[in-house]
Image (cartoon, helix red, strand yellow):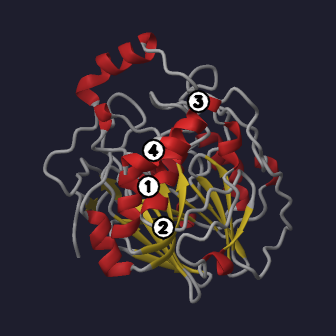
Amino acid sequence: MFKSVCWQQNAEMAQPVRGPFKNQAAKVDSGDGKIGAILWRYLTETVADKTPAQVLPVQRMQLPAQAGADDRLYKISHSTVLLQLNSHYWLLDPVFSKRASPSQLVGPARFHSLPLELAEVPELAGIIISHDHYDHLDKASIQALEARTALFIVPLGVDQHLRDWGVPAAKIVALDWWQQHQSKGVTFTATPTQHFSGRGLFDKNQTLWASWAIKTDQLNLYFSGDSGYFSGFAEIGRRLGPFDLTLIETGAYDDMWSDIHMQPEQSLRAHLDLRGKVMIPVHNSSFDLAMHPWYEPLLRLSVAASAYQVPLLTPMFGQPVLLSESAKINQAEPVTEQWWRQLLPAEVTAADEILLPQSL
């Protein structure tokens, strides 16, 4: 099995010796050495439309206590996604707090309402975590959901966070890349990404980061977590693909941290490498985390997807996506309304219609 990390088990203490975990590539720039320059840009650089000028449309969710038989997907916020598989609910990277930050007083605040409040989340078969950054692992959400969650599936080392927050060890499964766990007829495989981890100043890469292949008898899904573009996508596609649907990070990118977050066109390339059929972009339209307009990830990705005839779904937050139907989508068939286009500034709409297609 491919090993990406340094991990040992202390037989006497029965405690893991963590990190540092490593990417496949010998050198990956996470932007640490540019913190001063990045902070200066945030303080001095003006970017139009970093947050929406209008209220984003959200479809309120009303979920029965018992999941239905039809497999569904709901994009709740950023990278928070609810899956309904085999008559059970599964939650990916739940962040229900207002801010993706160590403090709820400062830091990036969500700029849309939630389609499902934390108290409304039904009993969960499990929660799946991609890595420990604040916009993917939220302490308040984990603690509120623990009593309603039967299982937590996480990358190596993230289990320590959960135990520290009161989650019983018996509920937690921690996996290395390429390891699998089966539950309720669903197989979860932890797969590589190119990223980093850490929640403070002194814990960089002490926990693993992962993407997830999620397979049932009827469907094969992929959830990217966070990643820069790398050859690992093709490896995942060869070993575990093709995928009926991919949920791939598309947002919070910048040239200054290009090794750890993809540009929209790279996100599409990753989808193709993975041998994906239908793509849903995540990691966008919720928090101000980069120096680009809030709508730019969806706009650029839609242009690229059209050029390569990739079926692209951009459901509004809370809108149900029937997975059995999504898996049958024909190439380039429009299946969800591009709600975000209605909120584009007039000059951007004109540029999209006239200039962007000619640049491909």
- The residue singled out by tag 3 in the image is 347
**Residue 141 relative to residue 1: left or right:** right
Give the alpha-carbon distance from disc 2 to disc 1, as whole Å.
Answer: 8 Å
- The residue singled out by tag 4 in the image is 356
Of callouts 3 and 4, the N-terminal one? 3
Of callouts 4 and 2, the N-terminal one? 2
* Residue at horizontal 33 percent and vertical 37 percent from the top: 203
**Residue 237 relative to residue 299: left or right:** left
Disc 2 on helix, strand or loop? loop
Of callouts 2 and 1, the N-terminal one? 1
Amino acid at the residue labelled 3? Glu
Of callouts 1 and 4, the N-terminal one? 1
Amino acid at the residue labelled 2? Val
- The residue singled out by tag 2 in the image is 310
The spot of residue 130 in percent (x, y) is 46, 55
Disc 1 on helix, strand or loop? helix
Q: Nearer the viewer, mark 1 or mark 3?
A: 3
Asked if disc 2 and disc 1 are in contact, CB closer than 8 Å, the reply is yes
Amino acid at the residue labelled 1? Ala
**Residue 98 relative to residue 214: left or right:** right
Q: Is residue 208 above or below residue 191?
A: above
Of callouts 1 and 3, the N-terminal one? 1
The spot of residue 65 in percent (x, y) is 85, 68
Q: Nearer the viewer, mark 4 or mark 2?
A: 4
Pick the residue in front: 190 or 278: 278
Of callouts 3 and 2, the N-terminal one? 2
**In the picture, residue 113 is in which quadrant?**
top right
Disc 3 on helix, strand or loop? helix
Give the alpha-carbon distance from disc 1 to disc 4, as whole Å.
Answer: 10 Å
- The residue singled out by tag 1 in the image is 304
Give the alpha-carbon distance from disc 3 to disc 2, as whole Å.
Answer: 26 Å
Residue 136 in view (yes/no): no
